[in-house]
Amino acid sequence: MKYRTLGASGTVVSTQTLGTMTFGSEADEETSGEILEAFAAAGGTLVDTADVYSRGVSEEIIGRWLAKHPTEAAQLVIATKGRFPMGDGPNDVGLSRRHLRAALDASLTRLGTDHIDLYQMHAWDAVTPIEETLRFLDDAVTAGKISYYGFSNYLGWHVAKAAATARAHGWTAPVSLQPQYSLLVRDIEHETVAACLDSGLGMLPWSPLAGGWLTGKYQRDAAPTGESRLGEDPERGMEAYAPRNAQQRTWEVVDAVREVADASGASMAQVALAWVAAQPAVTSVILGARTVAQLADNLGAADLVLPQESLDKLTAVSAPTMDDYPYGRLGIDQRRREVPDAG
C-alpha cells in the first residue's frame, strides 16, 4: 500500500479507500467485518461511509467492528457524510446548522466514537447559505468533533466558492472532494479538478470502475447477467445498461483497458484503478467491493505502476467530449495564451 497526505492537511491516508455503501445491504455484517479486516491487513487506512448508507446500518457495522478491533481502529481514518434525509421533517435534510448538528451527533453515536476524522457534505445545498454550513464545520473542528471536512458531488464553482469563503472568514478550510471519476466519467476535468488543485483539495474518486463496466463483466448488446448490480435486476439492469452500451466510446475504452491489462499481467479492474490514482489532485481511490475476493483484486492496484505509454493510451481513448461552448473551439480553446519564447 502507498500513502499520500489528505489534500493540504498533514494527515496521511492510503491511496486506496474502503467504500462501505454495501455494508448492511449487499454485504451482511459478517462479510463486512471480513472486508474491513482484509483492508486493514493490507495497510489500508481510510474508511468511507455515510449516514444514509443502509439508513445508518453501515455506520453501525463499522462502529461495532472498531470496538472489537482497537489495534486496527487506531490506524484507521474514518470518514462519513451528512446532508440527505434521515427523517421525514422539513429540517431533516440539507446543510443547515440545525440538520448538520443532529446528523453529526447521530453519526458519532452509530460509529461509537466522540470524533470523526473527515466529515463530508454529501451534496451541495442551494437553500442554506454557504457561510452557515462552513461556520458550523469550523465550530465542529474547534469542538473536537471532527478533524477535517470535505465535500462530495460538488461542482467546480461550489468548491471554489466554499474554499474562498472559508479563507475570507479565517475559518478552517476544506481538505477534500469526493467526485465520481473514472475512465468512462471524466467530465470533472472540465473545471472541478482545476478547482481542487487551486484550493488544495485532495480528490477521493467514487465509482472508479464505472459501476463494474471497466472490469470487463459486461458484453456489448447483451443483457447483464450473473453477480453484478445490473445483472441482479434485469429490468433495472437494462435501463442502466442501454445508454452506456449504445456509446461507441464505452467499448473503445473497455477494449483499451483489456489490452493494457493483458500487456501488464494485471486485471482490468487493477488497470482502471491505477489510471485514476495517477491523475492530478487524486489522493485516494474509493473501492466499492461487495466481497473479500473483489477487494483482494482491487487491492492489487495499489502497487501497480502503469508505463507512461499505457497511461497515455487510456487517457487518449477516454478523452471527455469538449466540443460544445464554452469548452470547445469557440470557448476556452480560443482563450489559451502562450508566453512568447524569450530567446
Image (cartoon, grey):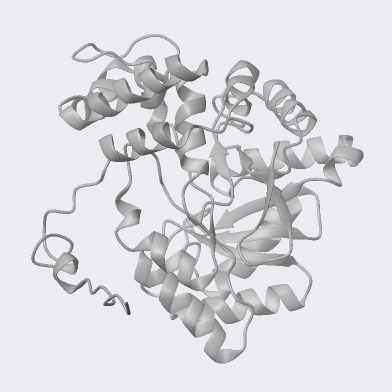
Give the residue displayed 66% in from the left and 62% down from the top.
104
| Quarter placement of the N terminus | top right
> Residue 203 appears at what percent x and percent y?
52, 55
Q: Residue furthest right?
A: 71
Does residue 56 lie above or below 61 as drawn?
below
Does residue 289 lie above or below 13 as drawn?
above
Which residue is nearer to you in this view: 229 or 18? 18
Give the residue displayed 42% in from the left and 18% down from the top.
228
Give the residue displayed 77% in from the left and 34% down from the top.
40
Q: Residue furthest front?
A: 343
> Residue 324 appears at what percent x and percent y?
11, 57
> Residue 341 appears at what percent x and percent y?
29, 75
Q: Residue furthest left?
A: 330
| Quarter placement of the C terminus | bottom left
Q: Is residue 247 visible?
A: no
Give the residue displayed 19% in from the left and 68% down from the top.
332
Is 343 situated left or right of 293 in this image? left
Q: Quadrant of residue 135?
A: bottom right
Q: Quadrant of residue 296?
A: top right
Is 293 situated left or right of 182 in this image? right
